[in-house]
Image (cartoon, rainbow, N blue to C red):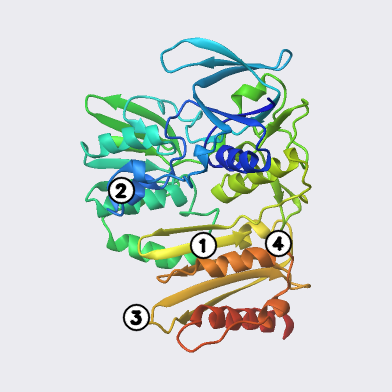
Amino acid sequence: MKKIHIIGASFAGMACARKLATLLPNYLIVIIDKEEQSEYIPNGLNELLQQKIKHLSESTWDDGSTTLLNIVRITAEVIRIHTDNKYLQLRTPDGQEKMETYQTLVCAMGATAKSNYIKGSHIEGVMTTKSFTDSKQCLELIEQKQSITIIGAGIIGLELAYSLDLAGKDVTILEATDDINFSQLDKEMIVPILENIKKSSVKIKTNARVNEIQKSDDSLTVITDTYQEFTSDMVILAVNFRPNSELLEEHQLCHFDRTVKVNDQFQTPIKDIYAIGDLIALNLTTINGPYYNPLINKAIKTGEKLAYHLAGIRIPKIEITKVMGSYYFGYYVSSVGLTEEEGSLYHDLVSLIYKTEIKNQDNSTIWIKLIAQKESGILMGAQIISRENHFLLTNQLSQALQHKLKDVELAFQDFIYSSGKTTLAYTLHQAMLALFEKRSLK
């Protein structure tokens, strides 16, 4: 029986396995992961702290397809890939080592949230939340501690700070740059979020690059590059994810940034070895170049595309638009494409912030920032903040970036108008008109 082995059973690995199992019913799909609860959704800790779920185990991505007869699960850690003889060296939970031969190997080891640059980031009391085990250990410590320092004020750090604040904890966020969530939002779009954070008990310190973490008795002290010290009961790392590509580095399959070298079909330079998900960079439509963006949607679609390829079904080259969405401190926050600061490195841009009230029960405010090329009007990015869930708009704008649509095309596209039911669609129409006018009526 032919086999396909997959290292990693998170989003990319499972998306690939599930699709392969249905496309190739005569193949055996072997998934290897050291985590028993590898289908854990990383946001589960926030859901639990916000009392939306009762147990971390409820936060899983499972559609039941893992019960398919041609999917086999091995709980073990892959400690080495032997490419010459095509076998994997495994370590089981009881510490024993064994060998597993492979025919086709899919690497889907994901990314890691650990830092190699902060001295002391691996000491007791410094936690991460990406995996089920990480989140479980972190939760156990949160229940025992009161003061918590979060390193990193991106989406992960802000969501966690919001959840911990709701749970009554004393939270301090340290951010190395000038602003919170700078990779998603431009400075002026951060203002309403900062206003809500000031109403909470969360403290934010920007321009605080962490160099070291020291432990003394029952507390931890975080030391910045300017020798500022912040002491708390525990520390949570919410730093940028990095590819978990160590297994492939010895085979010279990685770029300088540790992303894995692959072609358009996700095949590495070594035959029969593929890489997907957070291990790889994909072309970002707005710059037409590789961009590392470890997001769940990218993991799922790269896993599924590879499954189709291995089944002999051609899928065109896929790209990313960097679409993101989250909820913290009372706002739904989303973005797609480049920020204006980032995009100005590549294009001559025009931007506009459209602010209005959404006609709903509380007449809440929505902010929409649109960014386009000045001459052509091709949309380069968008940022939206509102109390109402607007994520469908952002998904729509993601398609606009994918197809390189112009502001005038988006302004005059069809949309459903139904009084009181399609407020967001009309709001986007008005925002696009305003951008088109600003760009064209000089």
Residue pointed to by mark 4: 402
Q: Nearer the viewer, mark 3 or mark 2?
A: 2
Residue 89 lies, with reference to residue 2, above or below; the image says above
Residue depicted at 30% across the width and 51% down the height: 53
Q: Quadrant of residue 256?
A: top right
Residue depicted at 21% across the width and 51% down the height: 168
In primary-sequence order, the first of circles 4 and 3 is: 3
Give the number of the disc on residue 362: 3
Amino acid type for the residue under numbered disc 3: Asp
In primary-sequence order, the first of circles 4 and 1 is: 1
Residue depicted at 55% across the width and 53% down the height: 183
Gap between marks 3 and 2, in whole Å? 27 Å
Gap between marks 4 and 2, in whole Å? 35 Å
Q: Nearer the viewer, mark 4 or mark 1?
A: 4
Gap between marks 3 and 1, in whole Å? 21 Å
Residue pointed to by mark 2: 48
Q: Nearer the viewer, mark 1 or mark 2?
A: 2
